[in-house]
Amino acid sequence: MKKVGLLFAAVPVLVTAAVYFLAPADSEASSPQDRTAVDQLARDQAKAKAERDAAGAQRAEDDKTIAALPPGLAAPAKKELAQQIVASSAFSSLDWRSSYAAIEDPGDGEGYTAGIVGFCTGTHDLLVLVENYTEAHPDNGLARYLPALRKVDGTDSHEGLDPGFTAAWKAEAKVPAFREAQEAERDEVYFDPAVRMAKLDGLGTLGQFVYYDAMILHGPDSSPNGFYGIRERALKEAGLPSEGGSERAYLKAFLDVRREAMLAKRPGTDTSRIDTAQRRFLDSGNLALTTPLTWQVYGETFRAP
């Protein structure tokens, strides 16, 4: 995406130069319409540059804010705990590293779900993972499935994937580079953006985990039941801690909305990852996600010492 952005950013400059040199101001060929088009293009360029500069300045300011905060969920021990809690919901185990090779189609309409955070063939993130991995390691055992992955992206179809894709995934999961690729994709798409947003919203370690788990399950999009859509809906119910609101009240509102989103997507789905895990931490006032922790998911009890 960055390469595409740079390409488009360069095109207007080339067009402007071409119009200038081919149609100078004293040429009869330079009509009022031509000059208007050039002027509009220049204004558009200036606006785009100003927006990029403003975004860059805002990000730099946000970076300073985050750098001054405690590491929170990004601290190694807390990040390990976060992966364990997620694994308890996704795999009924605290051993999240055993899920590199996990792959199945649970029949939820999103195709194959695989790997440490449930990358899906139907939700684009699995495709991006394999594309990025193949760019760095062209001879990997999943590369031959890229045409099929692109074709089924956004659907639950297995066309071109069966019968060999699941075996290929499990085999590739034995390769250290692929395990590292899964972790890198998890961090770039889910963990880092969730923790960053939570810190800017004034949330502590528990709130950062709440955002992270929601980002994984609902996806980083702005639809009503996507992560950013859920956040916007929660903001209508409670103010952000960064703006003087109560952290506990805001997290309660966020979990309420998120639970509704889970049920809206799949009526009757088990919401215990909220009800008897995250909400339990919140109700006990454990905003720092301090261990030891005890929680239940799907009726099974888990403990982190």
Image (spheres, helix red, strand yellow):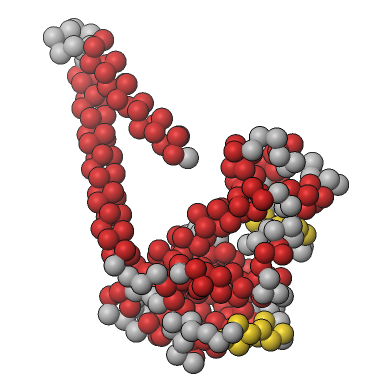
In the rendered image, residue 32, in percent from the top left (x then y), is placed at: 19, 19
- Judged left or right of residue 5, residue 171 is right
Callout count: 0
Nearest the eye: 57 or 178: 178
- For this orientation, the residue located farthest to the top is 28
* Image-quadrant location for residue 152: top right
Image quadrant in which the C terminus is located: bottom right
State whether residue 148 appears in this view. Answer: no
Q: Is residue 182 above or below residue 3?
A: below
In the rendered image, residue 197, in percent from the top left (x then y), is placed at: 40, 65
Q: Is residue 249 above or below residue 60?
A: below
State whether residue 273 appears in this view. Answer: yes
- For this orientation, the residue located farthest to the right is 163
In the rendered image, residue 81, in percent from the top left (x then y), is placed at: 56, 74
For image coordinates 28% across by 75% down, the residue present is 243
For image coordinates 45% across by 34% down, the residue present is 4
Q: Is residue 73 above or below residue 290?
A: above
For image coordinates 44% across by 39% down, the residue present is 2
Nearest the eye: 35 or 61: 61
In the rendered image, residue 54, in percent from the top left (x then y), is placed at: 25, 49
- Judged left or right of residue 152, residue 59 is left
- For this orientation, the residue located farthest to the bottom is 284
For image coordinates 72% across by 85% down, the residue present is 300
- For this orientation, the residue located farthest to the left is 26
Nearest the eye: 248 or 224: 248
Q: Is residue 250 above or below residue 229?
A: below
